[in-house]
């Protein structure tokens, strides 16, 4: 009889541990901010305005940035925007798509990826 209770106890403990891991993994991701490096598909939830440098930086191949109707813009005057890029793909990542929004005010609106 003692062996049977041990067998039942182990799966309950395992389920409890897995339950905590599932809870922790569903925590909300931090909001995207100006200058963030994007390494996976992204659906923007708000405008990114007054970016002091680059808007977003591409950090991986085969990702889609859905601006979701939002804008990525800078806080600089046109004469001061030298070198700032709205969405920077200077790393040369392939198959990057930027869609459904506007990038404005930067010297370079889109680094290397194409709009679709």
Image: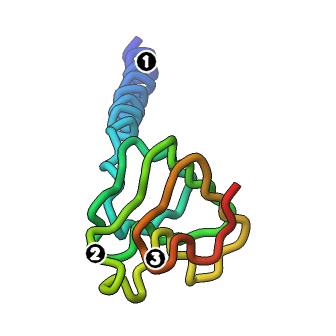
Upstream in sequence: badge 2 or badge 1 = 1
Asked if residue 21 lies left or right of residue 114, the reply is left
> How many residues crowd around disc 2 within 10 Å: few (fewer than 14), some, or many (20 or more)?
some
Q: Position of residue 57 (x, y in %)?
A: 47, 71
Above or below — where is 112 with respect to 13?
below
Task: Please state which of residues 114 and 59 is positioned toward the viewer in this rendering.
Answer: 114
Upstream in sequence: badge 3 or badge 1 = 1
Task: Tell me which corner region of the image, top left, top right, bottom left or bottom right, holds residue 96.
Answer: bottom right
Asked if residue 66 lies left or right of residue 23, the reply is right
- Which element carries disc 2, helix, strand or loop? loop
Q: Are marks 2 and 1 in contact (CB under 8 Å)?
A: no
Task: Please state which of residues 88 and 84 is positioned toward the viewer in this rendering.
Answer: 84
Q: Residue 8, which numbered label? A: 1
In what quadrant of the picture does the C terminus appear? bottom right
Above or below — where is 45 with respect to 93?
above
Residue at the spot of label 3: 85
Q: Are marks 3 and 1 in contact (CB under 8 Å)?
A: no
Asked if residue 90 lies left or right of residue 116, the reply is left
Above or below — where is 29 with respect to 55?
above
Residue at the spot of label 2: 76
Could you tell me how far apart the alpha carbons at marks 2 and 1 are, in whole angstroms?
A: 64 Å
Q: Residue 40, which numbered label? A: none
The residue at the point 29 percent across, 77 percent down is 77
- Which element carries disc 1, helix, strand or loop? helix
């Amino acid at each position: 009889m003692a062996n049977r209770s041990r067998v039942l106890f182990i799966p309950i403990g395992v389920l409890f541990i897995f339950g905590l891991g599932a809870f922790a993994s569903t925590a909300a991701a931090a909001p995207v901010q100006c200058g963030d490096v994007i390494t996976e598909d992204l659906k923007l939830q708000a405008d990114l305005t007054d970016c002091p440098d680059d808007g977003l930086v591409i950090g991986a191949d085969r990702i889609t940035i859905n601006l979701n109707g939002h804008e990525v813009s800078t806080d600089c005057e046109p004469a001061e925007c030298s070198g700032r890029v709205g969405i920077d793909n200077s790393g040369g990542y392939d198959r990057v798509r930027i869609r459904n929004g506007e990038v404005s005010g930067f010297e370079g609106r889109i680094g290397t990826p194409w709009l679709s």
